[in-house]
Image: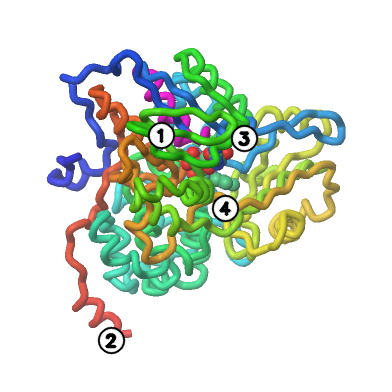
């Protein structure tokens, strides 16, 4: 877990890098008879299950829902014309630096042929001209300079007059330093310090911050800086992403389920685990698929993990630290998703995916009928279109009122939708995303817990390496599998990631300069 590239020159730092290297002297396969249970069939659980099953571990995967996928899952929904459409929790961008998740997906589709590039990445607003974040160079500071030159919101004057300390912090991501300096600060106060105009802040930061399911006031500034490094400043692949050309069940989950089964894993859906108890050298699992295991991976969403752990009294005694961490876990406000089947198409120039800034509810619009084949077929047959509207941190009380607000706000941005007839709709309001409030770094569970044989994975889990959203889930799942492999004497699965430190990491804070700057203003 050392960091050899810390010592290298800056340009080299911005390359993809190996974070976990397998020990060549250790065997790849585990001893015969090894077994493990993974609870939760989302990205984290399936990533753990794939790696373990490949090494010869007899894996049982227990998933509460009737399908795999968790927040990336998909399930059938019959439209009024009888068409069976797959609906999902929402559009997902598969970023190119998701090395771990992409490597798991390659097991079922080596060419990743289900992904296609979503070239255009606009941020749209009712007040200001669009910003396009696609096609920026990958390496800092060129990505930042190109953004400044191209941006219609960010002026060079803002760049030169920004608080130098806040600007340095953005470019100087380093886990320990960034956490120490900024975890106690909320993202809104940090952005205040950058001294941007309302327009720049709205067009370049607001939509980005809300993609993490939090309002700026409730998001740790350290998490914001980490994610800015992960997705933009330190991302060797640039800010480009791909999206599936068909629904997530067909593209991802059915192939991965088949792959797991081919390796001898048992996948059980409809198997909600209610509690886990220490049992001799292992764990007893309660629920419809009650079983025991030596190696247990809990790969749940944060609310479900909190419920299982706090509902398992004997676990509290065996793992007091995990129990306290889970009791303190915070779930983000609900997100709302409204899928609309409209009687007409939207204007030809509308991008497949648009981030939205400055609206109270609407955070993004995806034109599904220009994204995935099943929706495109429906649109071609009916002359209509399929849209999906998201609110990542929704203040509306229920799915119906959230959907009404989303639709009304869309009509302001895309007037051609105002009079469209909604032929079918599917609306959801759900709270399963993790929150990263100020002051909580170090309080969330890590992969390895204080109970022997019990590991935790998910997109809220503290991992030694920086990753975001789907990649954090997948990486934590693979790290949990690696912990099991280590105990069984087998070599680790390699893990790749982006450079773990920013261009200016290690450059001391310019407190004097900031003071002078503030005085000058
Ligand atoms: C609308 C939306 C848009 C998003 N967009 C993006 C994006 O563009 N890019 C990106 O990278 N990420 C995105 N994300 C985030 C991404 O979906 C998550 O980070 C990721 O899917 C989380 O995976 P996970 O395995 O950690 O958790 P989950 O997917 O929540 O999986 C947990 C699993 O545990 C199961 N479970 C719960 N309780 C129990 C129990 N008691 N017993 C057994 N099983 C149980 C659940 O049913 C679920 O299948 C988005 C999320 C949403 C909701």
Mark 4: is the Cβ under 8 angstroms from ligand 1? no
What label sits on residue 283 in the rendered view? 1
Q: Which residue is mark 3?
A: 65
> Label 2 belongs to which residue?
519
- The image shows residue 431 at horizontal and vertical percentages of 59, 53
Residue 478, position as x, y percentages in the image: 36, 32
The residue under label 4 is 355
Q: Is residue 283 visible?
A: yes
Q: Earlier in the sequence, mark 1 or mark 4?
A: 1
Residue furthest to the left in view is: 7
Specify the segment rendered in magenta: 39-55
SS at mark 1 in the image: strand
Work out how far the residue at label 2 is from the one at label 3, CA to CA, in angstroms: 58 Å
Secondary structure state at the residue bearing disc 4:
strand
Q: Foreground mark, 1 or 2? A: 1
**Overall secondary structure of the magenta section:** helix
Q: Nearer the viewer, mark 1 or mark 4?
A: 1
């Amino acid at each position: 877990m050392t960091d050899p590239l810390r010592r290298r020159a800056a340009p080299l730092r911005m390359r993809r890098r190996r974070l976990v290297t397998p020990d060549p002297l250790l065997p790849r396969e585990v001893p015969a008879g090894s077994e493990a249970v993974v609870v939760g069939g989302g990205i984290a659980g399936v990533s753990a299950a794939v790696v373990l099953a490949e090494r010869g571990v007899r894996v049982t995967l227990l998933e509460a829902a009737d399908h795999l996928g968790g927040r990336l899952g998909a399930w059938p929904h019959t439209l009024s014309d009888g068409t069976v459409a797959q609906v999902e929790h929402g559009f997902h961008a598969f970023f190119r630096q998701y090395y771990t998740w992409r490597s798991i997906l390659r097991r079922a589709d080596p060419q990743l042929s289900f992904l296609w590039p979503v070239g255009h990445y606009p941020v749209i607003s009712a007040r200001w001209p669009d910003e396009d974040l696609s096609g920026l160079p990958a390496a800092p500071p060129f990505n930042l300079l190109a953004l400044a030159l191209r941006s219609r919101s960010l002026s060079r004057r803002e760049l030169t007059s920004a608080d130098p300390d806040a600007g340095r912090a953005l470019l100087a991501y380093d886990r320990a330093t960034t956490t120490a300096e900024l975890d106690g600060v909320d993202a809104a106060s940090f952005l205040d310090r950058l001294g941007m105009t309302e327009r720049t802040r709205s067009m370049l930061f607001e939509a980005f911050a809300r993609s993490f399911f939090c309002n700026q006031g409730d998001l740790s500034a350290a998490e914001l800086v980490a994610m800015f490094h992960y997705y933009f400043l330190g991302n060797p692949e640039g800010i480009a992403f791909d999206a599936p050309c068909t629904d997530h069940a067909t593209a991802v989950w059915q192939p991965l389920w088949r792959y797991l089964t081919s390796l001898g894993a048992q996948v059980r859906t409809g198997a909600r685990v209610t509690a886990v108890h220490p049992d001799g050298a292992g764990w007893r699992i309660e629920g419809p698929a009650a079983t025991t295991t030596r190696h247990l991976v809990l790969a749940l969403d944060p609310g479900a993990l909190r419920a299982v752990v706090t509902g398992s009294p004997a676990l509290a005694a065996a793992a007091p630290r995990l129990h306290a961490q889970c009791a303190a876990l915070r779930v983000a406000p609900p997100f709302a998703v409204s899928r609309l089947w409209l009687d007409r198409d939207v204007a030809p120039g509308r991008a497949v995916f648009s981030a939205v800034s400055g609206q109270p509810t609407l955070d993004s619009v995806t034109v599904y009928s220009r994204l995935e084949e099943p929706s495109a077929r429906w649109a071609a047959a009916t002359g209509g279109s399929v849209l999906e509207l998201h609110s990542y941190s929704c203040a509306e009380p229920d799915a119906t009122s959230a959907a009404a607000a989303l639709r009304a706000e869309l009509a302001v941005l895309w007037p051609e939708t105002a009079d469209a007839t909604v032929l079918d709709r599917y609306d959801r309001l759900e709270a399963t995303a993790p929150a990263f409030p100020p002051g909580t770094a170090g309080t969330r569970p890590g992969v390895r817990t204080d109970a022997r044989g019990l590991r935790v994975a998910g997109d809220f889990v503290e991992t030694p390496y920086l990753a975001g959203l789907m990649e954090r889930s997948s990486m934590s799942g693979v790290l949990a599998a690696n912990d099991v492999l280590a105990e069984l004497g087998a070599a680790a699965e390699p893990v790749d990631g982006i450079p773990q430190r920013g261009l200016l990491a290690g450059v001391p804070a310019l407190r004097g300069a900031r003071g002078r700057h503030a005085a000058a203003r």
